[in-house]
Amino acid sequence: MKLHELWRKIIKFRLFFPLLCLGIVLLSNLVQHPDFFSVSVRNGVLYGYIIDVVNRSSELVILAVGMTLVTASSGGQDISVGAVMAVSGAVCCQILSGGGTSVTEFQNPLILALVAALAAATLCGAFNGFLVAKLGIQPMVATLILFTAGRGIAQLVTRGQITYIRVPAYRIPGGYIPGIPIPTPIFFAIGTLIVVALLLKRTAIGLFIETVGINSSAARLVGLNSTRIKFVCYIICGLLSGIAGFVASSRIYSADANNIGLNLEMDAILAVALGGNILGGGKFTLVGSCIGAVTIQSLSTTLYAMNVSADQLPVYKAIVVIAIVVLQSETFRNAITQLRKKEARA
C-alpha cells in the first residue's frame, strides 16, 4: 500500500482528529511541565498531572455520554445537566444528613440516599423528555426551564444551606477506595461508558437512535416510535447527570447547590462536538465524546498551569475550542484538499 493511500485511510478514521487534538493539547503541557506524563505513588495512591486530568474529567465524561444520546436522537442539547447534578447532590446529602447542615454519621442508609438522588435526576430527565418528545418543544428551550429552576430546586431541598457529610465512607465515590491507588471517579466514568456502549451494541437502540436523529419522519414511516426513543434518551441523560452529581457531591463531601455542575453543561456539549459528533443529530460515537471530555479537562489544566485566572479561563478555552472545531469540520478539510489539488496541478 502506497504511503499516501495509507495516510488517506488514517485521516478518514473517525477518531483521528479527536485523538490528534487531544494529543496536541497533552503534548503542549510538556513545555510547561517536562514531567507532565510522569506518574508516581504517594501515600498509596497514583499521583501526577495526567492522573489529575483523567480524574477531574470523570464527571464530564459521564455527562458527555448522556449528552451524546440526546444530541443524536433529537438534534438538540440538554442544557440542564449541570442543574440536575445539583439536584441529585442536594437530595443525596439531605437524606444522609436527616435535615441537618453538618453530620459526622449517616442519619439514613447510603443506598437509600443514592436511589432517591438518581430517581430525582431521572425524573428531571423524564420532564425534559416529555417536553421535547411529547410536546415537540425545541430541546434548548425545553431544557432551559430546569437550567434556570434546577438550582432553585436544589436550594429548596437543602433549605438554602450547604449540607456537609463529614463521614469517611461518603468520600469514597469521589476519592479513593482503600487499598486501590486509582481514583474512584475513574471507575464510575469507565463503568458508565461500558454499560451504555453494551446497551447500544447488544440491542438495536443504537441503530434506532441514529435513524431517528437522521430523519425522524422517515423513521416513523418504517415503524419506529420516534417519540419513545427520544423520551428514553432524555431519561438516560437525566440518570447519568444524577450519577455525575453524586460523584461531584462526594468529591467535596457536601451539597453546594450553587457550584456543583456549574457550567458543565456547556463543556458537555463541547465534548460531543470535539468528539466528531454532528450536533444536528444522527451518527454518533461515545468514545469520541469521551475523548472530547478529556481534551477539555486537559485544556483547563494546561491553562491553570499557565497561571490563567479562573475568570479568564472561558475566553482562552473558547479560542482553542473554536480552532479545534474548525480543524475538525468537513468544510475546512474539503477546502484544504481542494487547495492541495490546485497546487498539484499548477
Image: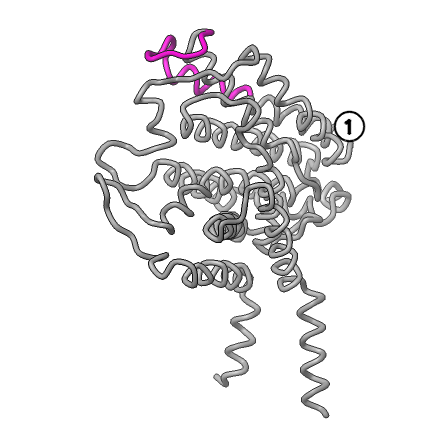
Which residue: 72% across, 66% down? Answer: 331
Question: In the figure, 91 relative to 292: above or below?
Answer: above
Q: Residue furthest bottom?
A: 346
Q: Which residues are magenta?
A: 99-120
Left/right placement of residue 16 relative to residue 114 reads right
Which residue: 68% across, 64% down? Answer: 330
Q: Is residue 119 magenta?
A: yes
The image shows residue 295 at horizontal and vertical percentages of: 51, 52
Which residue matches tag 1? 135
Q: Crowding at label 1, few (<14), some or many (≥20) Cα neighbours within 10 Å?
A: few
- Which amino acid, mark 1? Leu
Q: Is residue 91 magenta?
A: no
**Is 96 or 323 nearer to us in this picture?**
323
Which residue: 75% across, 46% down? Answer: 218
> Which SS class for mark 1?
loop
Q: Quadrant of residue 261?
A: top right
Which residue: 39% across, 17% down? Answer: 165
- Name the quadrant of the C terminus: bottom right
* Number of on-image labels: 1
Question: In the figure, 32 relative to 207: above or below?
Answer: below
The image shows residue 9 at horizontal and vertical percentages of: 54, 73
Colouring rule applied to residues: one colour
The image shows residue 155 at horizontal and vertical percentages of: 58, 16
The image shows residue 250 at horizontal and vertical percentages of: 41, 26
Left/right placement of residue 323 relative to residue 51 reads right
Left/right placement of residue 98 relative to residue 205 reads left
Question: In the figure, 170 relative to 177: above or below?
Answer: above
